[in-house]
Image: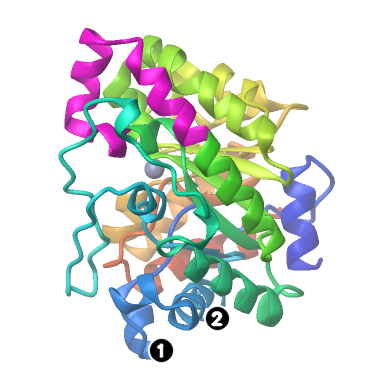
Amino acid sequence: MDVVDRFFNALKGKEVDRPPVTCANQTATVEQMEKVGVFWPEAHKDAEKMAVLAAQAWEQLGLEVVGVPFCQTVEAEVLGCEIKWSDKKDAIPSVPFEGYASPDDVTVPENLLEQGRIPVVFKALEILREKYGEQVPIMGHVNGPFSLASHLTDPSKMMKLILTKPDVVPEFCRISVDVISEYANAMYDHGADVVVIEDMIASVDLLGPKFYEDFSFPFEKELASRLKGPSILHICGNATSVLDNMIATGSDGISIDSKVDASLAVEKSRGKCAVLGNVDALVLLNGTVDEIQKETMKSIEANVDLVAPACAISPLNSNKNIKAMVDTVVEYGGK
Ligand SMILES: [Zn+2]
């Protein structure tokens, strides 16, 4: 079966010969960088390098996806947040920004899609579309609204803001939905087949189910409803208590962490959306081939629709370990 067809059949709940083996988050590693001679931080900023490095997920590992960008800082940067770059090739840029005190302080630039690294991401998508569009799904990664809102306020201050000025938080989230939806919709125009809403900071481990429901869920739902193409929602940590909400966002797929009960997620999602996951990223990083095989079999046996790492792949992950996951799905996924 064609890799692209298998991916979208699985995402839409149609018949497949085996689940796709894919990744909803970043896939680049130092080993891939060394093999292809393209490194961070340059590949975060240069479209050609970004595309080449993203393609290694498919070229070197056989993961059935290529996706950009690698970091969660593109949207924050265009909204004026300071970005901290590292010269280390395993370092993802961070946002050491002290935060806007008020939503009124945030300026959304007029030509949003021409700002910062947004054109770099678009160009990388075009290159990937051109070279790989027939072979493998092309994926765009965007922030979830709560995650971008947290960059705007500074994540360390977000919880205090929820407790002291709860009325202000939705205002930051609304700005975020506007920015992300414009950016994500343009990703489809530039070649993305699917967009992943990575709401990493909306982890229920940090927020708890009540605050997730009040401050994150409504904006994820709003964002998913505004997207003109297929979307996947990724939340980090143990989201078992908010699975119904994740499904109710209307995303085509939900990407779950290893702490989530995958069988329960599959049961709840049936007929509503696909489930991606949830091979423990730490086992993938540190485990033996045998341990990774067992971990991957757990996801296969839970009947997830698409087998994928539970979260972003560590830049220090070995090719051998990721291939162990891929090989397990290829060999046993259809049995
Ligand atoms: Zn995650």
In reply to whether residue 164 is colored magenta, the answer given is yes
Q: Which residues are magenta?
A: 150-177
Q: Relative to the observer, which residue lies in front, 293 or 47?
A: 47
Residue in the foreground of this view, choosing between 67 and 240: 67
| Quadrant of the snapshot with the N terminus | bottom right
- At label 1, the amino acid type is Val
Type of the residue with mark 2: Glu
Quadrant holding ligand 1?
top left
Mark 1 — residue?
36
Quadrant assignment, res 225: top right
Magenta region, mostly helix, strand or loop? Answer: helix
Tell whether 98 sits left or right of 11: left
- For the residue labelled by badge 2, is the local secondary structure a helix, a strand or a loop? helix
Q: Earlier in the sequence, mark 1 or mark 2?
A: 1
Whether 287 is drawn above or below 29: the answer is above
Q: How many other residues sit within 10 Å of disc 2, few (<14), some (14-19) or many (≥20)?
A: some
Q: Nearer the viewer, residue 125 or 269?
A: 125
Q: Quadrant of residue 159?
A: top left
Q: Is residue 185 above or below residue 139?
A: above
Q: Is residue 202 visible?
A: yes
Residue that badge 2 annotates: 59
- Measured Cα–Cα span from mark 1 to mark 2: 10 Å
Q: Is residue 5 magenta?
A: no
Residue 28 position, x and y percent, is 39, 69
Say if mark 1 contacts mark 2, CB within 8 Å.
yes
